[in-house]
Amino acid sequence: MFPAPPAFGIDIADDKNTGIFNGRRRSDQKTEMNFNTILEEILIKRSQQRKKTSPLNYKERLFVLTKSMLTYYEGRAEKKYRKGFIDVSKIKCVEVVKNDDGVIPCQNKYPFQVVHDANTLYIFAPSAQSRDQWVKKLKEEIKNNNNIMIKYHPKFWADGSYQCCRQTEKLAPGCEKYNLFESSIRKVLPPAPETKKRRPPPPMSEGYIPSNYVTGKKSNNLDQYEWYCRNMNRSKAELLLRSEDKEGGFMVRDSSQPGMYTVSLYTKFGGEGSSGFRHYHIKETTTSPKKYYLAEKHAFGSIPEIIEYHRHNAAGLVTRLRYPVSAKEKKAPTTAGFSYEKWEINPSELTFMRELGSGLFGVVRLGKWRAQYKVAIKAIREGAMCEEDFIEEAKVMMKLTHPKLVQLYGVCTQQKPIYIVTEFMERGCLLNFLRQRQGHFSRDVLLSMCQDVCEGMEYLERNSFIHRDLAARNCLVNEAGVVKVSDFGMARYVLDDQYTSSSGAKFPVKWCPPEVFNYSRFSSKSDVWSFGVLMWEVFTEGRMPFEKNTNYEVVTMVTRGHRLYRPKLASKYVYDVMLRCWQEKPEGRPSFEDLLRTIDELVECEETFGR
């Protein structure tokens, strides 16, 4: 038994025996179609994938636009059956889809989108002129709708996320300003009118071909494939493959060598009954044209062809590629502001739920924004921070958006206490996460946590933003185990002298380099020192640095060159990274860019974990 179809924009199989469709006879449909038709053309629609298990497919449909409906039919004009329709009054956005030369797996190469209710319909036109005409006419019909979006997603929803901002919720607010009357199709000029002076076409030997017959050469067009994981290192790949526990589970991921790819493969029978992982680099031939291969005798013109071949043939691999494993359907890092470039959030749009804990600034609660999106809400205790300075800086901080930063969504400042609204992280503080699971982390997972933090800090460094209080307590963990940097820059607004003064009992001396506890000189290089201590916290699974020493003793010890000991779980290579962070002079320490490159290499290196 299937549920009744929703009212708008639904694909439904017709009932051929009764001649009834959606409660109406086909003769009625014909009358409707011929009534007040604005546009009519055969286009291609992409399935809307309302369920995760729904297949992604592309179907040719006859589209008809009237004043009240956008309807699409199966078949040609002389024999057609209505498959779905959208009430024009429900449409919130019509716009060209920006594809950046991505592969479009159908013959029509000019996409546009129609956002209605809680769905997005992607439609593909055969030419730029056709697409532009549909977008223009649809915009004219919806211009008086009262539900027009403020922001929209300019790129496709694919593989469980929006390709423009990587948000993983289909209903997530847009990431680019939407202007109904300023189309992104300006670059395409209309065809020149017929005149007597029109130049004849060039000779056939040189002639032109339709632009949709041509695709530009791109460095990477793998995002459309379920087996491709763009930002996946070796340890995370192994974790994901092991959690699926399928013989022949595999994925293709970016190699640590730029421009190269690696196939990670899982087998339960790696030899003598033991399970194991294999990581095969996809190699390139030196011949022209270039070919790719895993096993030298089986070279192909593209990576998808290699994968397809080895899905049916082991041909030198430990097993054939049986089961594609992907993180794309799982919840991925989401960082995108809810506030449409307005840093002030209306407190009436917040629902307060359970208390998550309390920190330096006050109580933190789980909440919902507009009864839909989970958020963390910090109620700032009066007198805990310099509120005026913070509110000004919040406008800058909201623009810092990265998958490894906890996103600041906005603030509520029109009442007391003021609220800070941020991304909600299900597993809480990294420090507690480590302590509560001591003994259950592998070394590669611990290094992966450091890699996450380093990625976030490299972004802050690139944007000339200093954290000032980097430590495991100021990083959070989401449901997927991704670690994100939190509370960046917040230490500047604390009014508690015990925390802000280097002589205060709460000052984080154990995470500070000499230039900070002696002269309060903060920089990205002082953040690097703190990152080294954070790595130590991670590899000790949450121990307190210099746990037996007072702040005063730590200042003396560090000044004399004493450094934290090597944790048992840290290899020599990992500890060397920590020591580089703890160079006495700031200029002697690496940048986060250098650190990230080193950690990426360690993650890919088998010797790092003593394999």
Image: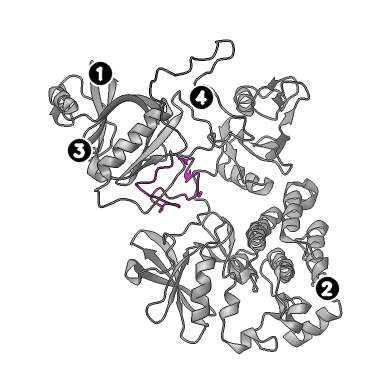
| Mark 3: amino acid | Ser
Amino acid under label 1? Ala
Q: Residue at x 74, y 58 (%)?
A: 595
SS category of the residue bearing label 3: loop
Q: Is residue 4 above or below residue 57?
A: below
- Of the image marks 2 and 4, the number of the one nearer the N terminus: 4
Q: Depth check: give the residue in front, 580 or 55.
A: 580
Q: Amino acid at mark 4?
A: Ser
Residue marked by disc 2: 584
> Which label lies toward us, 3 or 4?
4
Q: Quadrant of the N terminus?
A: top left
* Among the two numbered marks 3 and 1 on one chain, the one whose residue lies closer to the N terminus: 3
Report the front residue among 418 and 93. 93
Label 1 crowd (10 A; few <14 / some 14-19 / many >=20): some
Mark 3 and mark 4: Cα distance apart in space: 34 Å
Q: CA distance from mark 3 to mark 1?
A: 20 Å
- State the residue position of label 1: 77
